[in-house]
Image: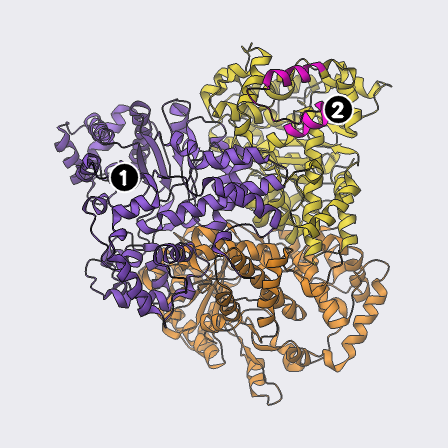
Chain colours: A orange, B purple, C yellow
């Protein structure tokens, strides 16, 4: 068995593979729409060459550093954290020596895709070839074709959404939009978590800055209006969505007096855990209300216990690999929000999860009724080949394809964007081909769906 | 790849498919045993022609109307609700125009099966052919061969269970049984939920009517006896099972004084939520006790938050597409019931779920020990090809095939009954064929199991 | 389709099967490392012939007796329980007559493997051949090649861990180690559950014996030291791990005064449920601390409601087939332990589960960060072909292969050990082959992983 990259992620059965390859061919070169991710817009604005292979492929990618850490490599030897000063070549060597430990992970698949398609590297990294591969990549990075904007064009990215603090001035986005030499759409995304969770560190200071910057009074009504002000600013700068990362998707509609009371206590840092939950739940409800009014798509990414290992957080900061999923409940938690806004035409609510159990039990049934609610593509730990196929199998039988969101890459690893979208397209083709061969959909319908999944559907869901 | 209906739902791998086709051939034409469903017995009694394609295939099927609603079609344009007066042809057009949105769902598979086998329609519905298809179907419905009884015969239905209110006089069942021209068995099913849940709207009035109609006193003992009276009446009319739709399968054995106290409060509408849960849990326990005594099979369908969207419920009533599953726990909840009655020979307790996580974790292990407990076939959102195969894979390795219930269609869509049973038979054949090819069961054993799954097993489990 | 045992559990697709067979060939004959199980070391010490087919294959295997019980055979007719005196031949007949009820279960697969490879029996047991098969097996058991030590050699077992009470004198282990005629390693495992759970029946008496036997004072510090003493004794006798069976993996770090207080109450039997949970959680935390200090691998098997059916427990004792899984939470429960010890080099913490939902959501993400934490192989109800493949698919994309534990058979059915390890090797080969064919790992890497999974990985994880 010689494996060909052309057949990657394709079904082993020949009849099914033939259909899958046809379907994939129809979408392989479609433009990339990336309506949610974490790329730094400044990178595209400055268009500097990438520093070195380690920073580009390892240090900033916590999917990669976490598994190296689990394999025994200290984080500071991987360039992680404020005090990091590890040598890039030695960081790269850690990855190469531990390459077999990544076998079967999505990260390994994406990295091999990048090495092959961008750097013409087909050998697997190893202790033996680590230095040679490092030199090869480092040499390519000096090539002007490897600057961020050149890659943006080469990748065929039409839309790239970033994720931004509500008080961000969005200067980078404005500069990119104004730049006649840059034709891509780089859109900000409103991410207000730290302003909505009264238990977030620095909440009171942050909200105070929000109120000052918008000139709104320190009342609950002022607070909500200040958030609306900043959303309007984001919309002016092209934003299409607001993203919410919450521990649980609990929602509640508090009466104004209670909301004011809890808000006042929160500003004083006097809120107990139970009341904090109520205020958080009310703010998720309010966020939906804002979306009904201003049209920003509302994405919700719940169910992750952030910074599970406090000693690592204290030493190295957030996003260092120990965010761990927890069980997540949608049916009861979202009911107040959905009773109030679930049939509003202007609301698009996209639900993500890292708890697979909710796909067939809660998310697909909800999306199969509420016109506002879309099934988010597999996220984070679930954005991987087998998990993606499990997801399609779990949601499609209840809600079809047109209630799903289209793929989002959610990445801060710029080079992985084509690999991730290509993975999604191949797997959707494979999934559709199976349904064709099993007589569950016709071949023409499969073609239409394959095309819509990379074009019409994300454009509709994210109002692009 | 040209798809043939004969190969529908069959494995793509040729060796496996050959075995699957052999196994399927052994059961394809077996009589249909439908021990749980929601067909109106009056339809068979009156034997009127079906009114029109929309009422027949869309309006009364909340699997279909829900996804159209999610796709943007208002429910009143689909003929749903008390004030509905939409034109049948325009309802049909909504479905045809949105046909691609159903691709991959179980409903689409069933509908295509019905269109092909009943109406000789092989084209997919679309905006273009909507009117022509409507006319074709409407013409067929005028044909005497399309009256309910003719279809009942054509479908090969041997037993059809309905679902009925405990105070139903079962006149339709009696008339059918007495009709020399109708040879099918149409059995009532005792469905007492609204009489067992003190928080159900109208509970006190309903129980009062129950007591009056049976002449029992307004005590807890009288209440239990009244339920027993009505079960006896159902048994006289051919009932084999009692069905319980509960939010959670919580059970508890209250002492008589507590039960009496809670019941008295319930009649006064004075029960708090916690006590209501206790009384509900005690009534599920009592229902098992009644089954031990009178032999009615006890089916439990838990874990659905009914009428999730109150505004839709208020305007359109129940069963309008927004019943949403919730996590369901069986191991602890059922323990009191099973400790008391789990090894009783006369009890057959069939557990259904819409929470797939319970299949391998709870339901199969329970059925692998308790002789009274059977694994219910995949229900509702899970009654679909991939979900059915996931179910078999999840439960069989722990409990084998003979602890499962046999297929139930649970449908109010009369025309879908053959499609649903055929789906189940094909998938069981496919599943068994895989085990044969993987050397996990022998070919003769697979044949025996395939036959037993459509005959001996449902007859045993449902005491047919 | 004629099935060949050589192709058992191999993929139906030919390309994938070719790769799988190659990979399997590389590991099929590797020595068996069994670092967790329940075989009686006295059996190997005495080396008596096995008594009869029923005791060997049925009576002591609650996987088998439970499903016979569910099928209507009373436990006492299966030789289960203190008062059992059923005739072995009649026990065997029960199994043979109900053989079709086991089709598709892991137990049937293992038993057929044993019948074929050990007793040259290829016919399926049935009512007709029951006596003949019984006689065949009984005759083989008289053969000296079927004594425990001869089978130990024939099976190629290099290491076999048993499971032992902390106060066990380990005389059997010592005698085996000292026996020049026995070359296998038979290692004790420290299993202190009944000494750590203040709600276990007989807790106070048992702890008192522990304190007396070690000469430690009846304080919390003395209690901890006594446990450390016994762990040291186990380590002297070759133990490599301590095993913890808990209802939930809750951990907490109590201050010394609270621990002392709860311990004193526990000895008096005066602990309420809430405090008992705290003390249990603290002892799991303490167990990790002991492992950091003495190096015993810590295995945790949570999430089983033991002895679900009290009447059966009262009549027949524990391990009689009604231990039922419950939902299990790892992320929050283990956080205190992992914050304290999760990055300790000396700690190896292996997490098992019978709740599949935790694989992709919690266990793989935890093992993908914490160097101390390994993903336990599928356990109990999940140690079966389809469940094993689901497990690999659920964890590998997040954590790769090298964060998993290697196979453990966890069995008290000595004869099933080769069947179980062979099953695991075939399925790992099948899983790896699929990844090769899908272009997700290279063929050479797959070979390395297949070999490491049966050798380097269990040796590292269990410090063999």
Residue C249 in the image: above or below residue A437 = above
**SS for tag 1?**
helix
Looking at the figure, which quarter contains the N terminus of chain B?
A: bottom right
Q: Position of residue A252 (x, y in %)?
A: 36, 57
User: Residue C233 bears which disc, if any?
Assistant: 2
Q: Mark 1 points at which residue?
A: B193
Q: Where is residue B434 in the image (x, y as percent from the top left)?
A: 58, 43
User: Residue B417 bears which disc, if any?
Assistant: none
Residue C355 in the image: above or below residue B127 = above
**SS for tag 2?**
helix
Q: Local crowd at mark 1 within 10 Å, few (<14), some, or many (≥20)?
A: many
Depth check: C299 or C184 in front? C184
Residue B321 in the image: above or below residue B97 = above
Image point (81%, 60%), residue name:
A93
Question: How would you classify the magenta stretch by its main secondary structure?
Answer: helix
- A52 vs B266, left or right, is right
Q: Local crowd at mark 2 within 10 Å, few (<14), some, or many (≥20)?
A: some
């Amino acid at each position: 068995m010689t494996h060909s990259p052309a057949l990657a992620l394709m079904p082993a059965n020949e009849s099914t593979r033939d259909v899958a390859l046809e379907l994939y061919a129809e979408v392989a070169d479609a433009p990339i729409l990336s309506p949610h991710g974490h790329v730094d817009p400044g990178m595209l604005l400055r268009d500097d060459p990438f520093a070195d292979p380690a920073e580009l492929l390892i240090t900033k990618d916590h999917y990669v550093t976490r598994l190296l850490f689990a394999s025994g490599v200290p984080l500071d030897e991987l360039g992680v954290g404020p005090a990091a000063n590890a040598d890039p070549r030695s960081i790269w060597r850690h990855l190469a020596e531990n390459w077999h430990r990544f076998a079967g992970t999505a990260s390994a698949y994406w990295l091999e895709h990048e090495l092959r398609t961008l750097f013409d590297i087909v050998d697997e990294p190893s202790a033996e070839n680590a230095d040679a591969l490092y030199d090869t990549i480092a040499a390519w990075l000096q090539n002007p074709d490897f600057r961020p904007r050149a890659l943006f064009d080469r990748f065929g990215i039409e839309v790239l959404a970033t994720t931004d603090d509500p008080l961000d001035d969005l200067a980078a986005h404005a500069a990119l939009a104004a730049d006649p030499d840059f034709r891509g759409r780089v859109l900000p995304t409103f991410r207000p978590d730290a302003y909505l969770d009264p238990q977030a560190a620095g909440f009171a200071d942050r909200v105070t800055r929000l109120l000052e910057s918008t000139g709104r009074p320190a009342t609950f009504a002022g607070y909500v209006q200040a958030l609306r002000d900043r959303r309007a600013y984001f919309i002016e700068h092209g934003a299409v969505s607001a993203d919410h990362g919450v521990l649980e998707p609990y929602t509640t509609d508090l009466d104004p007096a209670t909301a004011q009371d809890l808000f006042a206590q929160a500003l004083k840092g006097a809120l107990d855990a139970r009341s904090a939950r109520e205020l958080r739940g009310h703010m998720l409800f309010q966020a939906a209300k804002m979306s009904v009014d201003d049209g920003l798509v509302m994405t919700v990414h719940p169910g992750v216990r952030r910074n599970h290992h406090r000693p690592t957080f204290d030493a190295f900061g957030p996003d260092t690999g120990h965010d761990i999923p927890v069980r997540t409940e949608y049916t009861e938690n979202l009911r107040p929000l959905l009773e109030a806004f679930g049939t509003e035409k202007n609301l698009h609510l996209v639900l993500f999860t890292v708890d697979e159990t909710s796909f067939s039990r809660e998310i697909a049934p909800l999306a199969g009724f509420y016109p506002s609610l879309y099934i988010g593509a597999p996220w984070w730990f679930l954005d991987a080949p087998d998990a993606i196929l499990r997801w399609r199998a779990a949601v499609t039988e209840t809600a079809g394809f047109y209630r799903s969101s289209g793929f989002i890459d959610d990445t801060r690893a710029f080079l992985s964007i084509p690999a991730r979208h290509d993975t999604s397209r191949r797997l959707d083709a494979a999934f559709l081909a199976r349904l064709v061969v099993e007589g569950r959909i016709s071949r023409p319908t499969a073609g239409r769906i394959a095309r819509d999944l990379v074009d019409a559907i994300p454009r509709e869901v994210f109002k692009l």
